[in-house]
Amino acid sequence: MKHILLFAGWIFCALAHGADFVVAVSVDGLGSGYMQTLVDAGKLPHFKQLELQSAGTTNARNDYDITVTLPNHTSMLTSRPIKGSAGHGWTSNTDPAKGVTIHSNKGAYIASVFDVAHDHGKRTGLWATKTKFSLFQLSYDAEHGAPDTTATDHGRNKLDVFKYNKASRALTADFVRAMNEQPCQFAFVHFVEADSAGHGSGWGSEAFNAALIELDGCLGQIMDLISTNPALKGRTALIVTADHGGKDKNHAQADAPAIYTIPFFVWGAGAAYGDLYAFNSGARRDPAGTHPAYGEAPPPIRNGEVGNLALHLLGLGPIPGSKLDAQQDLKICRPVPGG
């Protein structure tokens, strides 16, 4: 496994927050090894751009216990593990039953990145390519979202925009249009094709590689939007990660390196160029090829840190009840010397 190289010309962490807009992209099924093979072959120019220009690692981890889509995305959006008293408790990987929410399943309200952003007057959005993501639309709508107890009441509907399209190309086009017209301060985008090809033909197959190449183009459109839109340029951070990798035609084996080894990149406003583990020495530990459980210290960088990192970039506090990056100490630039 290759790791991101360190660059000269460090950016130091001196700002209270780093962005006015945050876009998080999850590439479903993006195992780092498969991605790296295509990057090295020159077939994923935008993923290569992330490797060369982001604060990142190709050696992040998903949830320790469960390596399937919906539970891991719930972790990304709530910054909680899946299991345990502090976990969000959502283990199903199918469309939610009618009327069932993350909260009713847990028996308690589970706050999300959408709660904190919305309650502070930020516009939020979710673009998804799997119907099961309706879980988030239902859990954080005007009926099931928590009351806003901040100084200004922005209502209980925590998710301003929810869009579904089974094709990432069409979804990306809609996302770009929406961000040009009325941008969300926090937006989450999900790409499905690599996962579908992995299940159908196998991870690393010709079909899987073709899907990643297609998704590299979608990612490029989002990066171009961030780089050229006058409202977003220089003010937007992009987080790119995955829910899991894969092995053969599945990804249920939680202790398989090809499944638990995923990328985590932060590109744009507030982010330097370099290795996330080097930026976070003492607070996060590169797990090499191992599979650290929750509670091991220092922990690896996990995909569940997305929610709290996004809020920190926006200058907001952590998700209530969260456990992953709850101290918002994940640095995406080099610490100020002596700070």
Image: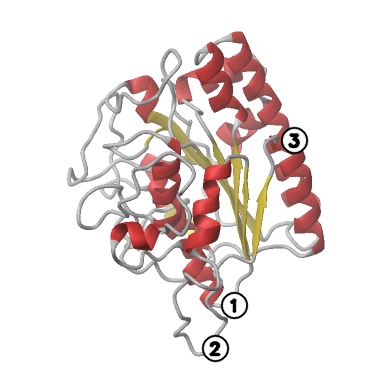
Distance of label 1 from label 3 (alpha carbons): 30 Å
Is 44 located above or below residue 146 in the figure?
above
Give the mark nearest the N terminus, 2 or 1: 1
Dot 2 amino acid type: Thr
Residue 18 left/right relative to 67:
right
> Is residue 315 among what the camera can see?
no
Image quadrant where residue 171 sits: top right
Quadrant holding the C terminus: bottom left
Note whether 37 is above or below 299 in the view shown: above
| Crowding near the residue tagged with mark 2, few <14, some 14–19, many ≥20 C-alpha atoms within 10 Å | few
Query: Mark 3 sits on what residue?
Result: 169
Residue drawn at point x = 59 percent, y = 17 percent: 208
**Residue identifier under label 2:** 152
Q: Which disc is residue 121 wearing?
A: 1
Q: Nearer the viewer, residue 255 or 94?
A: 94
- Quadrant including the N terminus: top left
Which residue ends up furthest to the bottom in the rendered image?
151
Q: Report the amino acid beneath label 1.
A: Gly
Q: Say which label, 1 or 3, has the lower sequence index.
A: 1
Name the side, left or right, on which 224 lies relative to 317: right
Name the residue: 32% across, 61% down. 322
Give the percent coordinates (x, y) of residue 117: 53, 69
Q: Disc number at residue 129?
A: none
